Image (cartoon, helix red, strand yellow):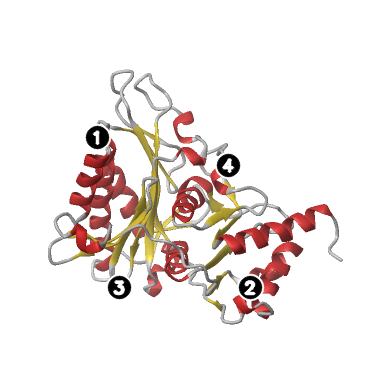
Amino acid sequence: MSHAAWKDFHTLESFIAHEQVLHRESRGLFSNVLRRIGLATKIIAAKVQRAGLLEMLGDHGAINVQGEQQKKLDIIANDVLKATFKWMPSIAGLASEEEDAFVRLPPRPAGEDRYVVMFDPLDGSSNIDANVSVGTIFSVQRCVSRDGKTHLEDFLQPVRTQEAAGYVLYGPCTMLVYTTGHGVHMFILDPEIGEYVLARESIRVPDSCKCLSVNLMNYPKWDVATQRFVDHLQKGVEPRYQKTTHRYIGSLVSDFHRNLMYGGIFLYPAESKSGKGKLRLLYEAAPLAMLAEQAGAGATTGRTRIMDLTPRELHERVPLVIGNLREIELYERFVGEQDRGPHK
């Protein structure tokens, strides 16, 4: 459907309402979750834009469960999201990158459909003092437990069972990008009316590798397969890579969004010595993988499709390579060759 065809229901609110009409079995519970995400991120956007004026920049003075220095805005964004969902009957629990354990919300009668929401409140916050774009990443799962209470198993479900995923980018304008498994849609926050307005519907990643997004200073720490892959793209021997440029912001949401718009590949591979990745499966890799696949791209650890993973713990970390399918397949081929024996 063309953008013009949405002229009568082009805000996030009306778009959600229209989706409910298309899916008549919906009782509106899940739609309310998306509405609350819209509300929470409007509040966070306002805080981010006024951070300097309200002295909210800088470190909070505490270390989170990830072993990272928390920023003042990390805490504020986390508190806003928790407060927004706290009294929603359809929400059973929350899990945040900034919290040691998941948050249980009041129990409800057994058998009711309820959801858990997982989020990175402010991705890229380490760069916020330099006025770099940051964002909120979220994922929604339907509870598997039916006793009206919240359990760890509700969060540790297969990635492929996500009900929705998305992010909000706080940049020159505030953008909400999300999917419920029926395409990827982008909304821009119009400050004049205070509403998210549909900007692009059913986004597809261009089939071009315009951007290579990776921290090249980590090159000596990578395994041979990753080094070969990056060398292959940078040398530009194939016509496809002759115009590929290196673009790395260091804010995952920003890097992913640029590649979603232009085409490209983002890498945060495992270090060769530890074999471990850095990015969090529940709060970063899983939701972005769902978005990527819905937009015609892909995501992998190098050996396993991200959407085929099942988390074992709340703060599990994984390697992440995400972007155009041709590059995903090429990277997996290099990894496969490495696993089969020395490259000759």
Q: Secondary structure at mark 1?
A: loop
Q: Nearer the viewer, mark 2 or mark 1?
A: 1
Sequence-first disc among 2 and 1: 1
Is 304 on the left-hand or right-hand side of 225? left
The x and y percentages for residue 108 are 28, 22
Q: Which mark is residue 217?
A: 2
Q: Nearer the viewer, mark 4 or mark 1?
A: 1
The residue singled out by tag 3 in the image is 172
Q: Amino acid at mark 4?
A: Leu
Sequence-first disc among 4 and 2: 2
From mark 4 to mark 2, how far is it between C-alphas? 28 Å
Q: Nearer the viewer, mark 1 or mark 3?
A: 1
Q: Amino acid at mark 1?
A: Arg
Is 184 on the left-hand or right-hand side of 26? right
Q: Which mark is residue 309?
A: 4
Sequence-first disc among 1 and 3: 1
From mark 2 to mark 1, how far is it between C-alphas? 52 Å
Q: Secondary structure at mark 4?
A: loop
Is 126 on the left-hand or right-hand side of 171? right
